[in-house]
Amino acid sequence: MTTTSIQEEIHVPVHHFELGVRPPLGEVPAQMYASVIRPERYGPPEKAFAVELVDVPPVGPGQVLVYMMASGINYNNVWAALGYPLDVVAARQKAGATEDFHIGGSEGSGIVWAVGAGVTSVSVGEEVIVSSGSWDESADDVRLGVDGNASSTMKVWGYETNYGSFAQFALVKDLQCHPKPATLSWEESASFMLTGPTAYRQLCGWHPNTVEPGDPVLIWGGAGGLGSMAIQIVRHRGGIPIAVVSDHERGQRCIELGAKGYIDRTEFDHWGRLPDIRDPEATAEWSRGARAFGKKFWEVLGERRAPRIVFEHTGQDTMPTSMYLCDTAGMVVICGGTSGYNADVDLRYLWMRQKRLQGSHYANLRECRQVIQLAAEGALDPCLSWTGDLADTGLAHQMLYENTHPYGNLAVRVNAVRGE
């Protein structure tokens, strides 16, 4: 029996449900509230997002409709709000989509509300955490053994796809649904499922450059969502995390999470792209700054050792220093470029010191489950520092954009009631 026929037989047609009012399980309305981005509003996130009533999407084969309780906030929907570097609405319309809006949100927690044909991994009523990676399990490359996360069909749900978690109902593939730990609140469960698995894969997924006991690891943006996850994962595996932060308060937070210490990046000014090597004066000035940063790393570590892994996501401003500082045969692993995408590398350090520059993009299902288990056991704190409501989605992204959020991860309640 198809989802449509099930709904026709047992679901009472209704217009929409109010936020925070739990409807009868499985009853799907015609419309829902969502925090929506439209092209005519592209710009600062606090202006780009607006709560609207939109149609609930139909549930197709292999898909799951999740009644969202809470949603995590991530930088990808800062980009969606800006319409840069990708106009997500135009990109989907070019591929054949008809919607002229974007419902973002790439992680969240909720209740399975309806399932499409062929779905057997979850049932209506189950409490789930929804992960970010979406791919076609029947794709040729997946069938030939490629990790689904590395498939040519892989897309980031709620950024490259529509109907993300900033809505009363979200549309996902069944493979994105994971059991929600009973030990975590809706808001906590919603907040770490993008940053946690991303950091875990960066640090544990690129053999032989994985964190081992005693390995020094330099972590950019240590007080942020990714950084706070990375600090805990490195410490859990016996490594020595050293964070880079923008002020003393954030540095202290990193120490509380398990960092050996921190470096205040505002004490240095050599950030940005490398000077032309044919300009000896500018090159020497940059080198002085990079060496001073390296000495600070030694000071915090307590010995003259280079980082075995450099945990990157800032990109343009920091990549030259990361590659310079990384240990011989070590790895710089990067999953983003929040300071820009044109990052320079002095190739002499790359080849002569046999260093590795590794791109990393989210995580596979096994890695997602491993991170959830760490959180369920209390070994990984979701680091939820701020929670708002659905109407605050734009504000939350504006804080990320301006780097004014407290630390760690952010979330908004969707259907969840405060304290539930």
Image (cartoon, rainbow, N blue to C red):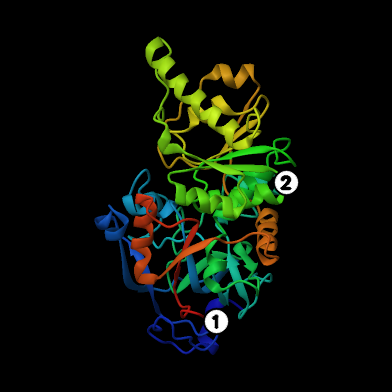
Question: Residue type at mark 1?
Answer: Ser
* Residue furthest out toward the left: 40
In the depicted structure, whether residue 266 falls above or below residue 415: above
Quadrant of residue 132 within the rendered picture: bottom right
Position of 258 relative to 352 (above/below): below
Between 103 and 109, which is closer to the camera in this rendering? 109
In the rendered image, residue 171, in percent from the top left (x then y), is placed at: 50, 67
Q: Specify the label residue 131 is tagged with.
A: none
Q: Residue shown at 52%/83% (left/top)?
A: 7
Amino acid at the residue labelled 2: Gly
Q: In which quarter of the image is residue 64?
A: bottom right
Residue at disc 1, secondary structure: helix
Q: Mark 2 and mark 1: span between their CA atoms?
A: 53 Å
User: How many tags in the picture?
Assistant: 2
Camera-side residue of 321 and 336: 321
Quarter of the image with the N terminus is bottom right
Number of residues whose C-alpha sits closer than 10 Å to that of mark 1, classed few (under 14), some (14–19) or many (20 or more): few
Q: Can residue 270 be seen in this view?
A: yes
Nearer to us: label 2 or label 1: 2
Residue underneath mark 2: 238
| Mark earlier in primary sequence (2, 1) | 1
Identify the residue at horizontal 60%, vertical 49% (top origin).
231
Position of 20 compared to 52: left or right?
A: right
Q: Position of residue 172 (x, y in %)?
A: 54, 65
Residue 61 seen in the current view: no
Q: Nearer the viewer, residue 345 or 292?
A: 292
* Residue holding disc 1: 5
Q: In this view, does 159 lie to the left or right of 121?
A: left
Query: In this rendering, is residue 35 above or below 325?
Result: below
Residue 88 drawn at (x, y percent): 38, 51
Could you tell me which residue is drawn at 37 percent across and 54 percent down? 404
